[in-house]
Image (spheres, rainbow, N blue to C red):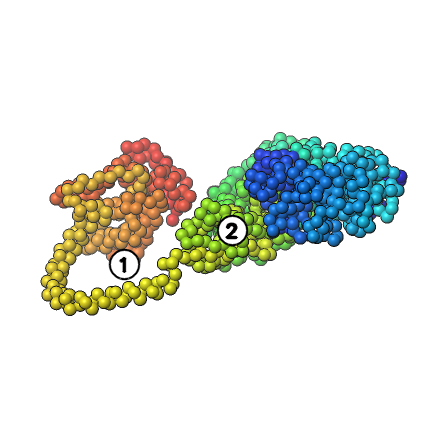
Amino acid sequence: MKKISVVFLLILYLPILVFSQNIKNQNVLSEYVSRVWTATDGLPGNTITDIIQDKNGYIYLGTYDGLVRFDGVDFYVINKSTVPEFNVVSARCIFEDSKGCLWVGSNDDGLVKVSDDGIKVLTINDGLPSNSVRDIVEDKHGNIWIGTSSGVVFINNRNEIVAPFGSTETELFVSDLYCDTANRIWIACSNSKGIYIYSAGSFEKLHGYPILANSLVSYITQDSTGAFWIGLVSGGVVRIKDGEIFSLDETQNMITDTINSIFVDSTDAVWFATEKGVVLLKYGELYFYTEENGLTDNNVEKIIEDREGNIWLATDRGGVEKMSLGKFRTVSISSSVNCIAEDYAGYVWLGTDNGLLCYYKGKYVENELTKMCKNIRIRHIEEISDKSLLVCAYSKYGLIKKDVNGNISYWNNDKGLVGDRTRVAIESSDKKIYVGTTTGLSILNTDNSMINLTRSEGLCNEYVMCLYEDAEGAIWIGTDGGGISVYKDNQFVKSYNTNNGLAGNVIFKIIQDKKGLYWICTGSGISRFDGNNFTTFNSQSGIGTDSVFQILVDYTDTVWMTSNQGIFSVPLSSFDEYANDNSKKINPKFFTKNDGLLSDGVTSTSLSMCDSLGRLWFTLIDGFAIYDPLKSKSNKIPPLVHIENVIVDGITVPLTEKIILEPGTKRIEIKYTGLSFVSSEMVKFKYRLSDFEKNYSNLTTSRIVSYTNLKPGKYEFEIFAQNADQLWCENPAKIIIEQKPYFYQMTLFWILFSIVFCGIVALLIIIKYKKYKINQLQLETMITMKTVDLEIEKDRADSLLLNILPDHIAQDLKEDRNKRIAEKFDCVSVLFADLVGFTKIASTVDPNDLVNSLNDLFSRFDDRVVLMGIEKIKTIGDCYMAISGIRDKTENHAHKIIEFARGLLQDVKEFNKTSKYKFDIRIGINSGEVVAGVIGKIKFIYDVWGDTVNIASRMETLSKPGYIHVSEHTYELTKNLVAYTEVETQNVKGKGEMKTYFVQL
């Protein structure tokens, strides 16, 4: 026997090594992201005996409690309990043949064949050597070979069970079957050393390889070169190529415990499943994956690769584990990372809450600057034109500078800096250094003189969050709450805030793209500014959040964003599409742990970067993550979509191409799935039921849809799936649904019914026509006169009553004049609107003109009351009182009253355009409990009482002309729907200090 070390295997894999020598020494297993499913996730047990992926894309798992079908989200167990025809207990081995039939071998119940024709169980009675089935393969002629604990048989194309010649001479306890490229059947047995080969109609033992003749063989397979890989029960792995044999054993540090299975993946890497972990042979190196570095269970039974390149591990006691190539490489640090920058030499500098780190080629480098910044919070790092490094610190050092020669200097408050807590520093094109602090902006001139700018010099806010120099040389200063100041030619030239259209006044980052457009990240969304107009993108646009910390645009024109929701990306073109058509929502891709982002989140208000190689470095609260567009490829395998079952009125019906619904069917539910295992939870769907829905549904992750009370007719249900990389399936799943009508819903029935009905009616009319004509003429005049009189009187009474009472109250009083009207409302919203300075105007103008003007204005208010469904209570002089939530008891009464208040302001504005008397109005609103009722018997008055009314009146008194002043209760009910100013504390008469708010108009 000739042994070869890993050195010889390197020669075998030389083409691979030449291509990948630069990454040979990396542990390739660290590039994978693992996900484990166990009994706690829905598996019937943690022992997985076998695993395959069928042609439909499902993962099938063998367990001692039956066969399990998995779509990445839900487990469906197939056994005696769920499918009575599946009359076996366990699923020891699974195989799908070339016709798509599923074969399942059990421990002691025989063999199950699942096909379109149904489920069939084969046992000893049908010709199997034993009911304990150990392995199944198919040869090139379509024969299905069954290896059992008592021998081998095959099932031919006539469904006959045949015992091949020589297979019964020795009672073979089969452990593995393999059909090679030459259509030979290889058999490994657990009770006989060596390998048996079936060829030319008979079995023979493999000769010429002493190591195999003296060993128990556990597994056999071939790679793409035709070489055989043979796993041993003890002794490692043997590789046979062109008659030459090589061993991979303990001399190469190979695990020599039982090799349960061997798998050659799509990259020609070889995976070994052993009793002591997983071994990967790739790039000529052995890599080990065990419980010590994250494997769920060392005893791995089977390894497969799915259609998307995910590696699946079936384990003995740890469930099933999936390994997917991650898009991110995450590096953990025990502190939050606030900023990242790369210097001219390729060193990456990390500013953390506990100091400064220098990272180079995967290792941390300590130097004088990192020592100096130890235990100091670093907020910003920037390399300037002379290759010096600027470091912003929250410490006595303020701004630190390290030049190319390693000399370190710093500026702080004692040296003229406006403050010691520096947040950001940049170098302008004229070589000045701008330093943003929490107390203002400092400009360090080339002659080392210092200029400090604060509010008194025109800075909109002294807390500087970010700095950016645009293409024109202007410095954009983003602040915390004051918006943006623009500084150029030694003066402030512009300022922007929400009054100009900016999304928010808290500014995180500012950049300018290659088209000259400004992208401004705020606490209330992203603002894109073309120099004249702002366009806002926020959660309503589809990006999933309002606060975006930073935008990075890579070389593919992909926009990367960081927020409290994590890291997500959007094609740059999506923003233009949304800006041109708001119906086309932006559809971002969020990255999760399934993509290798092993972190608890992004550091807020932090600075990520794109390095000189095009890689993106993201700051995290517990480290940093690197995304390399060259290595991180999107999943280009379209998902598969299937309709799994249909439930009609609570009963699951057989799944056929057409579902017939009997007359009277109330509800139909359709359960579907999308098969993409890279990130199954991120698979999204859109669907449509033709002739019921015009458009496809919004994207959803739900996997079930229901329809109720379908009209008679034929419908087609169509479902599409989109994977986590936003790639749509190529073929949607479809099903026809036909709702049968009752006989009286059929067109013919209604035609006949209409003919009969019309005939009867016509006959009755003819018979009674003469009789009714005479009576009709006599009564017509009398009835008309009486009716006119009654209607006139009724209209007068109703009009008078409706002028002083709400509709439903008036109706009650009309029905019972003596009825006592009183009602308690748990939560309504009360509005008081008062004309400012009315008394002063009233004393100086003609009373008739004043009353006409007041009537004109309040009539506008009355029209708006009717339009918006608000209840007018009364007017008290120049004060107008209304309430929301009494008429319809809606839950959004607070939002309705605020929109009503906005309308009052607009009414006053329109009124003032034409009236000779100009009024201002102040409005107060409160929400809460009231009691309402009618007082009096002769002159009715409908009124409301309670503390809520009093506070609403106080809100109006404390309001300002042209503003809407609300209480804290109203604010809490509408804060997610209405924009407010900052909270104000008001001294409310009879209540003391209360938190109040003004609506942003």
Residue nearest the observer in this picture, 94 or 410: 94
Residue found at x 59% / y 40%: 79
Residue to which mark 2 is pinned = 699
User: Residue 124 versus residue 102: which sits nearer the camera?
Assistant: 124
What is the quadrant of the N terminus in the image? top right
Q: Amino acid at mark 1?
A: Thr
Tell me, for residue 168, which label it has, or none: none
**Is residue 216 visible from the viewing direction of this image?**
yes
Answer left or right for 737 relative to 405.
left
Name the residue carrying label 1: 914
Q: Is residue 589 above or below residue 316?
A: below
Secondary structure under badge 1?
helix
Q: Quadrant of residue 381?
A: top right
Residue 320: horizontal and vertical position, in percent? 64, 38
Please report the residue visible at 54 percent of the width from the left and 53 percent of the height from the top: 656
Q: As drawn, which residue projects farthest toward the front?
A: 125
Locate residue 894: give its quadrant: top left
- Which residue: 74% across, 53% down? 141
- Where residue 578 appears, as percent x and y from the top left, is 51, 56
Within 10 Å of disc 1 (Cα), the crowding (few <14, some 14-19, many 20+) is: few
- Taking the spot 43% from the left edge, 57% from the top edge, the residue there is 740
Could you tell me residue 169's position as x and y percent?
80, 40
**Could you tell which of marks 2 and 1 lies nearer the N-terminus?**
2
Give x and y (percent) for residue 837. Answer: 25, 47
The secondary structure type at the circle numbered 2 is loop
Note whether 385 is above or below 787 in the view shown: above
